[in-house]
Image (spheres, grey):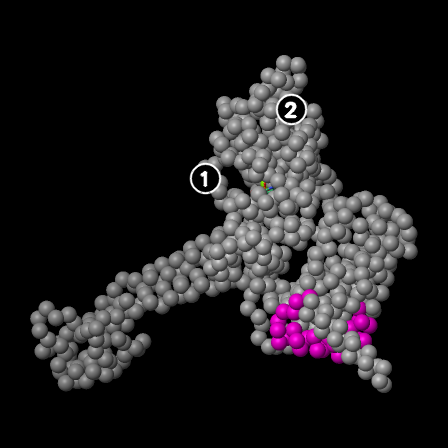
Amino acid sequence: MKGFRTTTSLRRSQKKGSAARGLITAIWVIAQGLTLTLPALANKPNEMSYSDLLQKVNEGQVSKVEIDPTQRVARVTLDNQKKGDPPKEVALFEKYPELTQSLQKNRVDYSVQPTADNSAVMGLLANLLLFFLLIGGLLLIIRRSSNAPGGPGQAMNFGKSRARFQMEAKTGVMFDDVAGIEEAKEELQEVVTFLKKPERFTAVGARIPKGVLLIGPPGTGKTLLAKAIAGEAGVPFFSISGSEFVEMFVGVGASRVRDLFKKAKENAPCIIFIDEIDAVGRQRGAGIGGGNDEREQTLNQLLTEMDGFEGNTGIIIIAATNRPDVLDSALLRPGRFDRQVTVDLPSYKGRLGILEVHARNKKLEPDVSMEAIARRTPGFSGADLANLLNEAAILTARRRKDAITMLEIDDAIDRITIGLSLTPLLDSKKKRLIAYHEIGHALLMTLLKNSDPLNKVTIIPRSGGVGGFAQQAFNEEMIDSGLYTKAWLTDRITMSLGGRAAEQEVFGDSEITAGASSDIKAVADLAREMVTRYGMSELGLVALESGGNEVFLGRSWMPRNEYSEEVATQIDHQIREIAMHCYQEARRMIRENRVMVDRLVDILLEQETIEGDDFRKIVEEYQAQSTVVNVQS
Ligand code: ADP
Ligand code: ZN
Ligand code: MG
């Protein structure tokens, strides 16, 4: 149930690929500009018109004419022209019979002298230029779009020498800089002792472990922790990312492994850190498309190297992954990564600790409470929290304040969880529709008994295609404990459908938008969990899913079904039942409060944001009024 979003948002369709198209257009325009300007360069001031020429020929003032048919000019020498003056140039039509006629009639000396056709050469050059610009542009696009390991982007780097791994003599990171993952820190404290005082262990015949595997989601501080070990022990830190091993060219990865271990042995004692080890360490001979020779060679080399040095050389290998399930079992055997340390997303206390670490070098107003921030940020990783304080500091600087206040913190949280705020839309039908959608969510958050209360609702759009959002106050108790009640889950589903329900009630069937797609996905996920994991449906107390329904890319690419087709049908039926029931409920509530919905939309369109407390006040006032009316009538 991680990944609960406390925000529901209306997404606009995203404009992908328009940047690439823009680039091509730009190249096209530049090239066209070049081709257009080239002939213009040939123009000279020393000109005469065609009719002038005819007249002068007939008047007998012309002594000589040279016609150049390729450039379509006639170079004219006049009788009264000074010696050394260049001939006058006359642009010609495609055909000029009257000129040749009068030239013959007046017996003027004329000749035809075609120049080498360099306009064709120019054209060719311009076209070649266009061609290369286009190719260059395409390469740029391909390179940008493929960051995948072994993707075509890396093929372009072929032959270029790159730093294979980084070495830091001193990381400068200490255990004090890592907060919120105390268990992991304690376990790794021992590794520091191995590095500093190996005698203590070897004296009693203990074998020092070679490898430690750090397991946890991104941004939880795995890299930081590895650096802290090196920092505390005062040893060099070698690091490489698993994806850098996996190259398109067979043998490159294996040779990199060899290089890395060679360098490390020269610098022992030291730490070798392998990030994203799952990129090389996948189960061999498995995955979509069968085995991958290159990766297997790299993995074999890694295993050989790990076996190849004695346990007491003073090299400790730390690897990080968030997919331990796909790792080759050979990696986890004793003598390799036999120690595994889990680094999880921080709890409230952990977040508080991390915030304190990162607040050390920031100037904060005394009223900023770290406790309040930690409470508001369930699900944030250490990296998210570091980013949050940094964003707040940037906002503070931009607003020319001396110290960070709670206002900047709030804005930074929104910015990280939802996106950058953009300028509001102009008044339009679309804006009204977004307002109805968000008011639908917000009103249900307020009216439903078991729903978390509204924090704010806004129609100021955000980057990433968010047209507006209704945000709930954080319910840290529920999220941290994971003890969701059925009533809470049901109300959450109803609330998530509030946006679509309002669209349909107000604008009718044909006007509903695709903007609710993320709401619907959230609803489907929640309802599925209720049925298959929490036993909250008529199917009863069965755990139909053992959790983690990801496709195990490394093992088999077909998700294993633990139930029959028939049960699957029943599950789908139950899910639909829950969703439809909640949707009906949401529509009923919108319908019955339609007058209030309209009024709230008007206020939202005018103010663009309504805070939770103000929203509740409006709803209460309205409810008080309508009961008075009811009593009177
Ligand atoms: P991972 O390797 O797990 O993806 P990192 O170690 O690269 O995460 O974390 C990125 C940044 O986030 C760190 O440089 C640090 O600033 C911050 N950070 C993450 N976890 C913690 C933590 N537990 N304590 C302090 N800072 C943290
Ligand atoms: Zn929505
Ligand atoms: Mg990392």
Residue 629 or residue 95, whichever sits in front: 629
In screen coordinates, is 173 left or right of 2? left
Alpha carbon separation for disc pair 1 and 2:
36 Å
Q: Nearer the viewer, mark 1 or mark 2?
A: 2
SS state under label 2: loop
Give the mark, 1 or 2, whose residue is nearer the N terminus.
1
Magenta-colored span: 586-612
Query: Vertical placement of 471 versus 540: above or below?
Result: below
From the image, give the main secondary structure of the stretch colored magenta: helix
In screen coordinates, is 549 left or right of 393? right
Q: Which residue is mark 2?
A: 209
SS state under label 1: loop
Q: Specify the quadrant that holds the C terminus.
A: bottom right
Q: Is residue 482 magenta?
A: no
In screen coordinates, is 11 left or right of 267? right
Looking at the image, how many numbered discs can be counted on the residues? 2
Give amino acid for label 1.
Lys
